[in-house]
Amino acid sequence: MTMTKPQRPNHVYFFGTCLVDLFYPEAGLAGMELLKRQGLKVVFPPKQSCCGQPARNNGYQDEARAVARVQLDAFPEDWPIVVPSGSCAGMMKTHYAELFHGTPDYDRAVAFSARVFELTEFLVDVLGVQLADKGEPVTITWHPSCHSQREAGVVEQPKALLRQLANVTLVENPREKECCGFGGAFAVRQAEISAAMVTDKVASIEETGATQVVSGDCGCLMNITGAAEKSRKGFTGRHIAEFILERCHGR
Amino acid sequence: MNSPRERILNRLKAAPRRVLPERPDWTPPVYDKAGRKAKFKSMLEASHADVHEVTRADWPERLKTILANKGVGTMLFAPTSDAGRQLAEGWAGQGPALIAYDRGIEEMKEVLVHKADAALTTARGGIAQTGSLVLWPSVDEPRLMSLLPPIHVALVEEDSLTDTLAATIRAQAWETGMPTNAVLVSGPSKTADIEQTLAYGVHGPKELIVLLIGSESK
Amino acid sequence: MDAKAGKMEFGAKAHVALNDPKLRANFRRAMDGLMTKRAAQFSDQEEWEALRARGAGVRARALAQLPQLLERLEANCTANGIQVHWAETTAEANAIVLGILEAAGARRVIKGKSMVTEEMHLNAYLEANGIAAVESDLGEYIIQLAGEAPSHIVMPCIHKNKVEIAELFADKIEGQVYTENVDELTAAARAALRGSFAGADAGISGVNFAVAETGTLVLIENEGNGRLSTTLPPLHIAVTGIEKVLEKLEDVPPLLSLLPRSATGQPITTYVNMISSPRKPGEKDGPNAVHLVLLDNGRSRVHADPELGDTLRCIRCAACMNHCPVYTRVGGHTYTFTYPGPIGKLLTPQLEGLDCAGDQPHASTLCKACAEVCPVQIPIPDLLVRLRTEAVRPGAAAAVKGGGSSASVSESLGWAGWRLLYASPLVYRIGTRLLGWFGNLMPASAPMLKQWTSVRAKPKFAPKSLHELAREKGFCDE
């Protein structure tokens, strides 16, 4: 099923994600600001909470469905739902159909999924934003989350945005596509393997010479920057929404 | 009856019925005549095989020279095949000693495993896409000829080349009757089991020499 | 605790592997090489998508008519002179193989590479019954000399570097002088195994595809040992899982184009060996008898589940493990059972039981690298989630062997709490505020945080949640 991209809408919903809500609210706010500066009315429904992925991935489908149903209720209008996370967007785009299969909510779950956009996907594919870089020269590298690349299908859009920034040098990490080892509960259940993965990821970022790693997913960022901080690496991490907003709108 | 067979099949048959999917469209590559030959050669050469373009008349002489340059002492051949007869006719003199594969393996094992330096077989066809020889070993040309001696020489006609295995199977209607053994050979025996490093001749031939008989040589 | 519980040891084995720098380096180098080679084969995205759709379709089509195709395969093999046997369990399959060997008076066996016979632990069984089975694939030969199991389904000795192999050969092969030269090591194996081939009373092999239409067994390989094992000895026994059947000969080419390219980045293997009968009158070589052993060992149960049944599409190319960030770091032996990597953590719990290997479906970040490269489109991560679900679903034993065995009161209470928190806006508002306060007070050494902070800084709850900031900035008004 190919989805036709909507015409530039007047309203969009913003789904902040549970992780952004508690740990990276500035990234969420930056995402909403970017949309607002494109002339859109941005609505953050206060009843939203979590896409349900943690329970789903750990095998608790009833719990996942109950929480996902709250989201179905929280976004009633037929507006696009923009998500500052490829992982949560991937969950909502690709797994709601199976999660609600055989339930009375199936049809509206499918319709909901069709309205979900990852933030950079929306900025590039729907809005076609043009960015004017006002920041200092900086060398960065991009970290795509696994679910962003392989579930939400967002690969080129964030890089296209970053390449619009005149003073930003984007260097490619040869191991960019490899998982950082976060994986939600995996980081606790298989802590040693997760530690080995993030250690390698941090080393590969360091080798690029970038002073910042930019990502569209805060789960990865929490993992990567946490490891970089602990091992005193010479780079920091930033969510792409904050990174762009700061450079282009001087916030 | 309640044999393992029945129990397995009964369990499989009790599974929920699945929709029988159609085969999704897929088109294997197609080449023109020149492209087919070029692809066949380049793929074989990339797999470490030597390809020599020969004619129907001169190949035994050419082979004699090739083998002499390699210092080959003995060559196994099929005395009752057309190629074997043509080979034997003009072979007198300086070439490697010919050994006929004319008895069962039980009697030939020692020769095959330890004595023959090379063997000549014909190929029923060739596949351009992958640079593969299609061998259908026969009463005349037994299976082990292309496998045990360190050098395998294969005679293949340009006119027998096809684009792909799919095309070969279709054109020759393989489903109507498969031989005891059909083999695709795409280079000499090789392995990369030790540190991904390619090494040739691990169990089968170390060298594959392909004599490609041009279609113009008829 | 039953004996099986001892096999839930993924984490413990991973710990050992992670702390073995040589092993880590061997796997990393090998997997990097295999990924690069595969990528070069599938640079044309359109061709790849069409081909893998065909491959997946062909396998799905075969599985959709599995019992009928097995009956057709049996009928056509029998008509061709191949004797077909059925085994429900590995014990039955071992007994069948032994029975065939004993009836033929065979004492010495040469083996082609076969993962199904690894699943059966056939070599040990034959040895206990006085029959010597020598592995002839170079990688299998190396690990047999070392007394180990394969750590990869295509490259069995990938965990060893050439120095280790050089030492092993010098130690175990008579008259072998120490050399790290790969050509010389390969030649040494060739020389050592020639006698085993020539003296073998029987050859045992696996099967890559069994074609129902013609009763043909397709075996692919690079070394020639597979052809030798199935041609030189007077008796050939092929052993295969029941899922390897294909409907038609025309189904072979697309899979043959997918398998070696996905596995090792080769356009095709050196040999594609298609066996349709034993030696016919007048033919000078080839085995006088060919047997085919069809092994179930839990596959019919996997097949019974419409979703998990897709597991059986697998053509054993190993691309999933080559691309798996977990496998790359812990190696194949960490998976304890025969099949490692993503396909292993999917297949093993289904064959052995979730009570026995239920830790394996959790040894994944669900990064989907495996699904991305699977040539037959097995949705491995989604099926792992399904297994995780079955493991904690009380009464799930009917769906998956050992289902429900990981259900725990504390864990389900935890998720009930999670649900309460996230499904009720009011509880969420209060709860997250409390979390923020207490979370930041928790020391990095607290039980829940200790694992995380072993290599990472402690995450900090933001002073204000996005919910609060959004309200303040007016984003909550419609």
Image (cartoon, coloured by chain):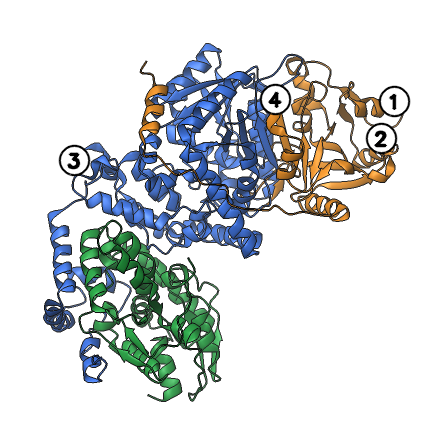
Chain colours: A green, B orange, C blue
Residue that badge 4 annotates: B180
Q: Which residue is mark 1?
A: B89
Secondary element under disc 2, as helix, strand or loop, is helix
Dot 4 crowding, Cα within 10 Å, few <14, some 14–19, many 20+: many
* Residue C157, placed above or below residue C442: above
Examine the image and state in which quarter residue A65 appears. Answer: bottom left
The image position of residue B121, as x and y in percent, is 73, 28
Determine whether label 2 and label 4 are within 8 Å by CB. Answer: no
Amino acid type at circle 3 is Met
Of circles 1 and 3, the one toward us is: 1
Q: Nearer the viewer, mark 1 or mark 4?
A: 4
B41 to the left or right of C206: right
N-term mark: 1 or 4: 1
Chain containing mark 4:
B
Marks 3 and 4 sit apart, C-alpha to C-alpha, by 52 Å
Quadrant in which the N terminus of chain B appears = top left
Q: Chain of mark 3?
A: C
Q: Position of residue C430 (x, y in %)?
A: 10, 71
Element type at mark 1: helix
